[in-house]
Amino acid sequence: MMKKRRNILVLHGPNLNLLGEREPGLYGTKTLAELNASIISQARKLGLSCRIFQRNGEGELLDLLHRHRRWAGGILINPGAYAHYSYALRDGLAAVALPAVEVHLTDVSKREPWRRVSVLAEVRCACIAGKGPAGYLEGLRRLARELGA
Ligand code: DQA
């Protein structure tokens, strides 16, 4: 039987579809497709399965959380700017009650003051920021440990 704890739902939030062309000085030149390929390869090495989505809308991200909640054992999410103000996303993560790791490509603690706040802080088990694409791979390792997968 498939072990649910090996299943990771990966969610990329708003504007991350433009990775590679979006403010490359900040976010790098890797495209979302390239990032996803490295996530899939790392997940394989760790014996994890991933379902990966990018959505710009808050409601669309919530729909994915709800839809995949019974399949997923854990969540890896770059909420983009929603991290800083989306109480709906915060409540959604609390509702599905799965271990969640928040990832940011940039070091949000060293940018504008409003980026230093994450309203998701209470509902995720870790936040990895400022490590670029490698942060996602670290996030997967963190989830694998958390889930004992
Ligand atoms: C980001 C940081 C957010 O503040 C920003 O709104 C993003 C990207 C990051 O990955 O560094 O869209 O989540």
Image (spheres, grey):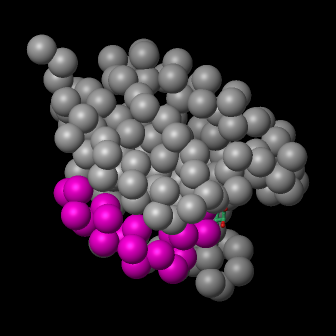
Residue at 77% in and 48% down: 18
Where on the image, by quarter, is ligand 1? bottom right
102 to the left or right of 90: right
Q: Residue at x 52, y 40 (%)?
A: 53
Relative to 144, does residue 132 appear above or below in the rendering?
below
Left or right, residue 85 beside residue 73: right
Q: Is residue 84 magenta?
A: yes
| Residue 149, image x, y percentages | 22, 27
Please, is residue 116 above or below residue 27 in the view?
below
Q: Is residue 75 left or right of residue 13?
A: left
Where are the magenta residues, as a range? 80-97
Of residues 110 and 46, the one nearer the viewer is 46
On screen, residue 93 above or below 103? below
Give the residue at the far left of this rendering. 1
Residue 4 % position (x, y): 19, 30
Magenta region's main secondary structure?
Answer: helix
Point 49% across, 57% down: residue: 60
Where residue 88 sits, quadrant-wise, is: bottom left
